[in-house]
Image (cartoon, rainbow, N blue to C red):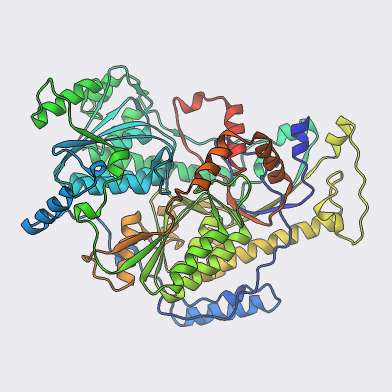
Amino acid sequence: MAKLLLIHAPHVVPRFSCTRSLVSASALYRRPLLVNPQFSHIGPRLRSPYSRGFSARAFDDSPASSVEMEKEKQEQLRDGVSRERDEDYPTGEMDYEDRNAWESFVVKLRMLFAYPWQRVRKGSVLTMTLRGQISDQLKSRFSSGLSLPQLSENFVKAAYDPRIAGVYLHIEPLSCGWGKVEEIRRHILDFKKSGKFIVGYINICGLKEHYLGCACNELYAPPSAYSFLYGLTVQASFLGGVFEKVGIEPQVQRIGKYKSAGDQLSRKSISEENYEMLSVLLDNIYANWLDGVSDSTGKKREDVESFINQGVYEIEKLKEEGLIKDIRYDDEVISMLKERLGVEKDKKLPTVNYKKYSGVKKWTLGLTGGRDQIAIIRAGGSISRVKGPLSTPGSSIIAEQLIEKIRSVRESKKYKAAIIRIDSPGGDALASDLMWREIKLLAETKPVIASMSDVAASGGYYMAMAANTIVAENLTLTGSIGVVTARFTLAKLYEKIGFNKETISRGKYAELLGAEERPFKPEEAELFGKSAQHAYQLFRDKAALSRSMPVDKMEEVAQGRVWTGKDAYSRGLVDALGGMSRAIAIAKQKANIPLNNKVNLVELSRPSTSLPDVLSGIGSSVIGVERTLKGLLDELTITEGVQARMDGIMFQQLGRDSLANPIIDLLKDYLSSLR
């Protein structure tokens, strides 16, 4: 009963929320939200060679703003504003080049003077295990888990490191998104250009794991390995029936026909629009997987699909079909590698693991240089304006902290360009807008490239709109330009549990944000709907102006719809497809730096290794239970304004994931939405 009372948040809940129709639906909104959001006056128009020529002033929430905005858009259209196409940008693909004698000598000399913990035995095999979540943030020495930036850097270093003979990649079940999977796969393919071997080993063969493994030169599995190459599924959960039984009535205003976040609260089944959107997303991911496996194995696409539809679970069948190289235990693969490298049977295979190799400096391998500096600003996690009591370093985007980094880049003359790396489903809309403003100001002075990871939707897309160029992975989840507002009416619940609440107010609409003990009055419902429509129009029109797109054209791709990066590109929401390497190449192009020149990439989001931050991280996970519980209650009852959030669209493969307890999934998803 106490848990039900947690739902009680005497505020309205308008959200800029990405479509929420997922595998394990977070039924309860993390925070109640304000109605009738006001975008702050942003100031006069700034022009530079790097801007698209749009005016932030157009989004002053004043009666004349829409007129000025429309006038400005018409001027742009008359001026023939257009964006570059994907083919106009450099690809950023790795071209492996052998070192000359002098370069090799310098590298060997640097290795000689490297610190002991950075030394690697010649002929070593780099061993890395891909498992679970993979963060888009840099990790400190005290952090556990994998970091995509460090993982990517290890592949590049290993390709040029004369001490590394090859890579042995253990691939375990992954729970990251498909955007990161694409980035890792690209690095595997690039590493192969060095001529060194990369061998994969897989115990549990799911779609993501096989997609990476088949990109290796060889892929092995033990005879007892599990195969779950059955297909993909996406699930939508609905709490309308649950709320009805316990006496809670969600009052939802849905703006945009694809905005389904409120559906979880009010509906008992999936809507036609949500079904259509999820089906298209699923088609894109599945087709991308089929194409990738077909390219890597040399098999016809239809043959791969036919094999999947047979429901094969025996690992021997994968070998027969050429989807893996052979069936061997780990020790047998190691023996094979020893033989390949000429290591005696009774000797140990020389290896270096991921953690140790992450400490090898790029400078040692001659992979740094160049006077031109490009700033890398990483923005990952849910968006909030200020640091909360439960915030841990790198777990979320704190607007006030990110703004400091953005301003430092803008005020510094040493940076020629900046890359904003976004991996966020969104969050606080006010925070998103404040960061948008700072990114826009930065883009007025130097090139800014937005690089999208797994997800850059709602507030995440809001941030990206301010960049000069947006780069997304094929399977990045992005867009979600829409609004849903909701308020819970708890009259029936209160009646069931014998609870009574009386509200005394002054002002016609004073009870709009409270009085959950009764439904809306007609005039309150009307204001509720108008304020939601107003919030949506501000978001949509801002997106239209940022993308140099007529509002009616933006309306076609907005309406709360989530797109894959590939579809977002074809509809003008992003400029190019690729990963971080392509974003760097485009940044060099925009900054007039020759593409073959080395640049110094300066990470401004490095994790703190100070004792207070380390202890803070420990405290939030080990001690302070009472404070943590109090923080959770505060999260549920304190409003921080409009939310621009995609609560998560997750795709599962049929197999082990589908056996999970749906109640546990629901709780996990709900708790994750509180971050």
Tell me if 23 is positioned left or right of 418 in this view.
right
If the image is split into quadrants, where does the N terminus sit? top right
Viewer-proximal residue among 354 and 121: 121
If the image is split into quadrants, where does the C terminus sit? top right
User: Which percent across, then down, holds residue 49?
Assistant: 40, 79
User: Which percent across, then down, holds residue 664?
Assistant: 59, 28
Residue at point 37% right, 23% down? 311
Tell me if 496 is positioned left or right of 41 in this view.
right
Q: Residue furthest left?
A: 101
Location of residue 571 with respect to 497 vertically, above or below = below
Observer able to see residue 186: yes
Tell me if 247 is positioned left or right of 563 in this view.
right
Viewer-proximal residue among 289 and 418: 418
Q: Quadrant of residue 633?
A: top right
Number of numbered discs visible in the structure rendering:
0
User: Which percent across, then down, holds residue 194?
Assistant: 16, 47
Viewer-proximal residue among 546 and 337: 337
Tell me if 18 is positioned left or right of 205 in this view.
right
User: Which percent across, then down, holds residue 615?
Assistant: 53, 42
Viewer-proximal residue among 376 and 255: 376
Observer able to see residue 252: no
Q: Residue furthest top?
A: 224
Residue at point 35% right, 55% down? 580
Residue at point 58% right, 37% down? 669
